[in-house]
Image: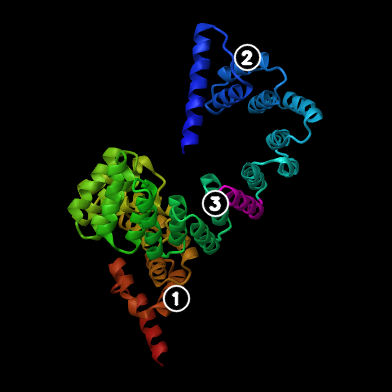
Amino acid sequence: MMQINNEEEEHNLSLSKFESMLKTNKILFFDSEEFENIILHYIDTGKTNLAKKALKLGIEQHPHSTGLKLVHVELLIFEDQLETAEKILNELYAIEPTNEEIYIQQANIYSKRDKHEKAVEYLKIALKYTDDFADVYSLLGMEYLFMDNLELAKENFIKCLEVDIDDHSALYNIVYCFDFLDQNSEAVAYLNTYIDKNPYSEVAWHQLGRQHYQLKEFELAVRAFDYATLIDDRFIGAHLEKAKSLEKLKRFDEAIASYEITLELDDPTAYAYLRIGKCHDKNKSHEMALQFYLKAVHEDPQLDKAWICITDHYIQMKNFEKALYYVNKALTIDNENKIYWKRYGAINKALSLFEEAETGYRKAVEYGDFELDTWLFWIDLLQFLGENDSALHTLVNASEYFPDEYDIEYRIAGLNFIKEELEVAEDHLLKALSLSFNNRDVLFELFPNLIDDHLVNRIILNFNNLKNS
């Protein structure tokens, strides 16, 4: 730790000294390694103009430095000047053919050109000459990711982590590969092995918790997230995912407590407020839930999920005027959401705003809600509004999704009786009766003028006699 602090101190001193020199125009001497670190710092922070100034001064003071020439190559690659970079690398290869950095930078050039197999070849050569195996294995892993070869990517990231057990980036990439390959159980086995070697890695415990969550092993997930937060009690992601796992276990009070920790550790998030509200709802504390939903939309007015939760609260309270106001808020944010349109339909129906209700159910179906009740609400509203042709056309569409549904068949029969399409009506009535004779009252509830219709009653009577004969 002392060595790291000293290195950081020296690095910061070099930067301060360099920037002071630029302000005073007084030329100061730096060794070549100092220049390399200064240039790389400016490349990493996106300050390419300062990187170029440092490079120019560096090469003036150290014209034969291989390290500075390699940093120059890195800067050229960063700016997509690949041919110039390659020319310098060829010159360096002639001087230092065993310098691994030459092969690494050549690999970077091929990677930039999307020639990832060639990049892999150069990285494998670099492995022969490098002392920093972890870095090269990590680069190999990335090349295999670019090639969509997740197994080889995973294998190389694992090798990287074997060399540098604290490389969190490699650990995240390994887990990414397991996730992508749907190997959650294998990920659990690997992470447990890794934790045996590095038991105080909060990142590993957190990733283990995520895998258990994916496998619906919520008790084990909570345990893993607990360890992550014991090691680092300010680990917001672990507290958050522990809360999600507790929700799955229906331990809502504990989930609320975990979400509240995230609010204390950092600026409040609309997501945390929303989840706390949901937990209060599950605990039947509906007024308390409402307060948190309102906090969520205050924090993020574009969070449509919170607006719809407020909508549902007022539907439950049968305050449909307020519910309508809030569902419109949700629809303003996402007007292609089938769930929101269905709510809009139900609310307007409760307010006896039937044309608006019909719009809601129609839009819900248009945006992918193919639930039977949605179709039926829409069809019955069309009929109520006197739009029998539209209702019949919609029923025919619905029957493609529900070919053997008595609710649809009785409605098709009823509308055809009204249109005096008697043969078609009889066919559909017979089909409806065969699907569910006991629910024949559906026909008379929707079409009360057919109660005393002789033809309808004769068809039903004949069907019953035939059924019982």
Q: Is residue 208 above or below residue 143?
A: below
Tell me which amino acid carries mark 1. Lys
Most extreme residue toward the front, as rendered? Answer: 2
Label 1 crowding class (10 Å Cα cut-off): few <14, some 14-19, many 20+?
some
Label 3, label 2: how far apart the Cα atoms are: 42 Å
- The residue segment tinted magenta is 149-164
Quadrant housing residue 299: top left
Quadrant housing residue 264: top left
Tell me which amino acid carries mark 3. Tyr
Label 1, label 3: how far apart the Cα atoms are: 53 Å
Residue 328 pos. (x, y %): 30, 43
Label 2, label 1: how far apart the Cα atoms are: 90 Å
Residue corresponding to mark 2: 57
Q: Is residue 304 left or right of residue 44?
A: left
- Residue mark closest to the camera, 2 vs 1: 2
Most extreme residue toward the right, as rendered? Answer: 94
Residue 176's mark? 3
Secondary structure character of the magenta stretch overall: helix
- Asked if residue 302 lies in the magenta stretch, the reply is no
Residue corresponding to mark 1: 431
Tag 1 and tag 3, C-beta contact below 8 Å: no
Quadrant housing residue 41: top right
Q: Earlier in the sequence, mark 2 or mark 1?
A: 2
